Image: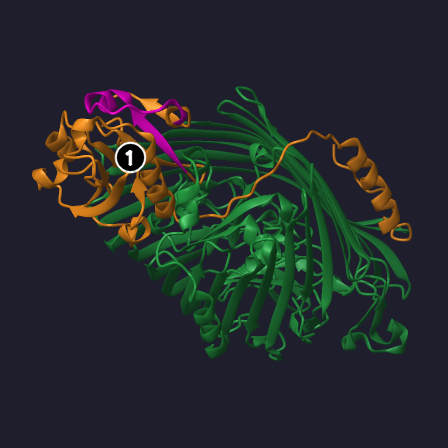
Chain colours: A orange, B green
Amino acid sequence: MFIAPRHTAEQGITAATFRRRTWLGLLLGSVCLAGPAATVRAESEFAVKAAYLYNFAGLIKWPSSAFDSADSPFVIGIVGHDPFGGLDNVLRGRKVGSRPVQVRQVYPGDAPALRACNILFVSGPAGASDVMSAVRGLPVLVVGEAEDFARRGGTVGFVLKNQKVKLEINRDAARRAQLSIPSDLLAISQVVESR
Amino acid sequence: VAAVQVFAASMLAGADPGLPPSLLKLSVKELSEVKVDTVFAASKYDQKVTDAPSSVTIVTRDEIRLFGHRTLAEVIKGVRGFDVTNDRSYSYTGVRGFNSLDDYGSRVLLLVDGHRMADPIFDTSAVGTEGFLDVDLIERVEFVRGPGSAIYGSNAFFGVINVVTRRGADLNGAEASVTGGSFNAYSARLSYGKKIPDGPEVFLSVSTFATDGQKNLFFREFNRPETNHGIASATDGDRFWSTLAKVSLGDFTLEGGFVSRVKDIPTASYGTVFNAPHPQLDSRGYAELRYDHAVPGVSSINARAYFDAYDYYADSYVRSATAARKVFNHDMAEARWLGAELSLSRTLWDSLHVTAGAEVRKGTDLAMRNYNLHPFQEALSTHSDQVVVGTYADARWEMSQSLSLSSGVRWDHYDSFGSTVNPRAALVWKPLEDTSLKLLYGEAFRAPNIYQLYYNVLGYTANPGLRPETIRTYEVAAEHYFSHHWRSAVSLFRNEIKDLIQARGENGQTMFCNSGNAVVNGAEAEIEGKWGSGLLLRASYTYQEAEDTKTGWLVNSPRNIVKANIGVPLFREKLMAGLELQCVSERLTLRHDRTPRAVLLNFTLLSKEILPGVDISASIYNVLGQHYAIPGGPEHAQDQIAQDGRTFQVKLTYRF
């Protein structure tokens, strides 16, 4: 199983014989197939989540009833602590279609403010239930990061898996909110059901 | 410091104020592949670094390449609070002011993909060329400071280092790498990885390395005509080959690895003949089957079963007591062990995350032998076995949005000394999402190993009555993120160690005893900045006072350590410069001398995709050519062992 060296000190394994043996091993082990290899630097978890939110705004289709007029802004609300440290700075001047993006801090008890948002991001370990009851039936995408957020009624949950931010999507919740989730977003997500 | 500040300010002038805007250009598919900072090893499940019940550092593959690290030892050296010394036999890992000279880095637990690397005979955490992995195969390394016995059992005394290897899907093809460097050092690696859609994921890699080492080494302790005036010629060679293979299908992973290294020992350790051949072989291998399953609602089930092997053979000449002539001696150890672990992790009532597990390890054949040839004379032949059983539970309770309490306890039973129970607790307060304050308490143990219990040759006496040594630690750790670029961390710690297992010499006989207590008080501060352009700035300072309660300042424990790392994109990310600085103050030696303070500067230029699929890097280590030394252990006649001066390495990697 393991090679017991049967050499004496005078004949100690020399670098040369060692190299010869290992080169042979390398040759035997060589298998080749084409394919690009990409490397990605480790980013802040919240930078990735912020970029997701911006992507959702462009990918997901909101019904026209979600907006007062053709030029009213696209509103992203942050419920709880703001973990992004300047999401409004980064998204300032950005547009979703023709709508300027607006970032607001909203409080979980402030139902009118919650209803005025198109995306709500619930930060920290808070669940979806409080926010969901305020916006039930309205076209608001509720995104969170608590464990099983989408299973517990939220629309999209961020999940940390293998050092990556993955998505869980509750399609029933999306349907109730009249939001249509495109297939390329579903393809990279895990579809979950309410518990 | 002022220069760094000015430099930083100039680099920051054009930087964006908030998130890296480049991320906004990515599609959701690309975003789902971006790596973020999480840690597994702190609690045996993936959690945010700021939530972990310990002070945690993550080193990524990109950083390892940027700073030109050749071994895991060099990666560890760059991390705040960690220290690695090399006596030209092995590399030894110390943590927070404690790096004993009579063990093999056994007070830190090394894991590869969660697999315990310490062997039952010597408890080696092999991080140098004897180490298990080619650094090119590392995806990231998690450093968890503080005791981890509450979930890992023995050896997780001062900390846990978990090496996560690359995945087949990340490689997605083949990769070849060759290096050349000082002292005729050459290495080569060939790797292949692939994930077949809806099928298995495979990873296979083979590496080899060989160096002549320093041609002539001068040791003044041997400066006599009969010992070649202290010059050891061509006795510093080093060569290894190693392999790592992984196959995953669904929730199952089969992983296996093997390394075989031969090092020529130039120091004439253990009273062997000076300037004579003294090759020492270490082979380490394992095969492990893992099952990782996440059930909706029930967070996860992890199970592993493994078989491990470790062999050590040393050939040398010794002077026989009766005759003046030299006699050929063979010292060896062989260990085979197997084990299994099951751990369950579940969220209860939304705010309570519970992990529980059990583990069993059985050393089936743990053998040590020592004999002379011509004439044959056996000095030692022991065979033993060992059974270790452990079970643990760990819980994290989210008391409120900003406050969480983690606590855990583990019970271990050894057939040699009996049972031990080790708890830990952590209160994590996050007044803001980007600020965390951790109050940490922990207890841990290090079980006596087979070598310490039963080795009785070459002036050593066995001591089967050894008890485990224990530690209690107290730590306050604060972490704060400024905007999205700067992170700062401060730690104050106190470690109280009891019943240290140390080699004690009397009348020419050495025996391992539970002798001595030690206290380490220290403080660490670190600041780190990272930008989307690839710019990286990091600096840390550690002050540590490690005292034996009777004899005072511990040997091999520098009081002040400054570390700094700067990564600069010279031409976008195509050409990067990596500068690494390590300043280590004096260390006390066994003979009450002091090693000189060392200022080490390493410089690497890394060019990525200079041609399609081709990366090239060139590194100079110890640029300043500092003459520095580390204290020699009791097995060496040398009180100080000189380290290498300026060396270089070039590396070429090709993906196809």
Give, as a single range, the part of the protein colored magenta.
A165-184
Q: Position of residue B2 (x, y in %)?
A: 46, 78
Q: How many labels does the image show?
A: 1
Q: In this view, does A14 lie to the left or right of B3?
A: right
Q: Quadrant of residue B119?
A: top right
Judge whether residue B279 is colored magenta. no
Q: In this view, does B567 lie to the left or right of A183?
A: right
For the C terminus of chain A, the quadrant is top left
What percent of the width, then of the height, locates residue B453? 59, 51
Q: Nearer the viewer, residue A97 or B519?
A: A97
Query: Is residue B394 among what the camera can see?
Result: no
At 65% from the left edge and 54% from the top edge, which residue is drawn?
B607
- In which quadrant is the N terminus of chain A drawn? top right
Image spot of residue B96 (x, y percent): 47, 64
Q: Can residue B376 be seen in this view?
A: yes
Q: Mark 1 points at which residue?
A: A147
SS under mark 1: loop
The stretch drawn in magenta includes residue A168? yes
Q: Which of B478 and B422 is in front in this view?
A: B478
On screen, residue B646 above or below A69: below
Specify few, some or many for label 1: CA neighbours under 10 Å numbering under 14, 14-19, or 20 or more.
Answer: many
Residue B593: image location, x then y, percent? 62, 80
* Parent chain of label 1: A
Which of A173/B560 is in front? A173
Q: Label 1 is placed on what type of residue?
A: Glu
Q: Is residue B536 above or below residue B119?
A: below
In screen coordinates, is B76 left or right of A43? Answer: right
> Quadrant of the rendered structure where residue B40 is?
top left
When the figure is inspected, residue A76 is found, relative to residue B599, above or below; the finding is above
